[in-house]
Image (spheres, grey):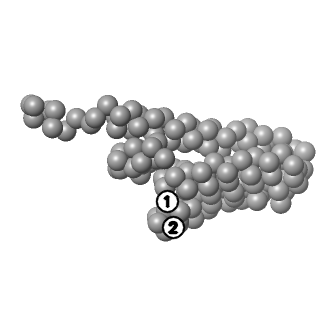
């Protein structure tokens, strides 16, 4: 066995890591894509609901606040429910946010929906970056069970 083979993963472990990577990448992509979708609609909301530029700025700020809060809480949440649980919670939060934004058309619904979207983005970005970049061994565990 050469020196390079000593660090090679067995075929099953490599497949698990690859599967875990693609699962995490897909969840990350879906959450991040949904987070950007409502932005072009803000101009329409501004006209429809007679919102000021300041109010639209608050909507953006609430989203950013949700991201920051979630990023600060990801380590403690991950210790309690695991990284897989955080990824599932992020996707579930994004789905709930989408339902809320679709159902509640007034300003409070927009604000709460964007806060939830920010939380989902913070959860998924903090966890996915940790899994993919810093901790590839966790990807095997994520895919195996």
Which residue is nearer to you in this view: 71 or 6? 6
Q: Quadrant of residue 40?
A: top right
**Residue for point 14% across, 33% down:** 4
Q: Report whether residue 133 is seen.
A: no
Picture coordinates of residue 79, whole percent (x, y): 47, 66
Q: Residue furthest left?
A: 2
In the rendered view, tell whether residue 140 sits above or below residue 57: above
**Which image quarter: residue 55?**
bottom right
Q: Is residue 123 left or right of residue 43?
A: left
Q: Position of residue 105 (x, y in %)?
A: 88, 50
Name the side, left or right, on which 59 lies relative to 119: right
Label 2 Cα crowd, 10 Å radius (few <14 / some 14-19 / many 20+) = few
Mark 2, residue position = 80
Residue at 9% in and 31% down? 2
Residue beneath disc 1:
82
Task: Check the image and report above or below for 82 versus 88.
Answer: below
All told, the count of numbered labels is 2
Q: Quadrant of the N terminus?
A: top left
Placement of 79 over or under 46, stated as above or below: below
Asked which secondary structure carries label 2, the reply is helix
> Vertical placement of 19 versus 129: above or below?
above
Q: Residue at x 76, y 59 (%)?
A: 112
Callouts 1 and 2 close, C-beta under 8 Å: yes
Is residue 79 shown left or right of residue 36? left
Question: What crowding class fits label 1: few (fewer than 14 Cα within 10 Å), some (14-19), or many (20 or more)?
Answer: some
Q: Report if residue 31 is visible in the image.
A: yes
Residue 127 percent coordinates (x, y): 48, 53
Residue 54 appears at what percent x and percent y?
A: 75, 57
| SS at circle 1 | helix
Q: Residue at x 53, y 63 (%)?
A: 81
| Image quadrant in which you'd find residue 9 | top left
């Amino acid at each position: 066995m050469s020196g390079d083979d000593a660090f090679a993963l067995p075929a099953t472990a490599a497949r698990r890591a690859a599967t875990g990577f693609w699962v995490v990448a897909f969840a990350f992509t879906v959450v991040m894509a949904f987070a950007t979708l409502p932005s072009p609609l803000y101009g329409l909301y501004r006209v429809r609901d007679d919102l000021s530029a300041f109010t639209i700025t608050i909507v953006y700020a609430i989203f950013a606040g949700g991201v920051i809060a979630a990023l600060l809480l990801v380590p403690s949440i991950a210790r309690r429910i695991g990284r897989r649980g955080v990824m599932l919670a992020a996707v579930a939060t994004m789905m709930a946010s989408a339902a809320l934004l679709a159902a509640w058309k007034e300003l409070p619904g927009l604000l709460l929906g964007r806060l939830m979207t920010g939380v989902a983005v913070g959860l998924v970005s903090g966890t996915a970056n940790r899994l993919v970049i810093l901790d590839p061994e966790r990807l095997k565990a994520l895919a195996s069970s």
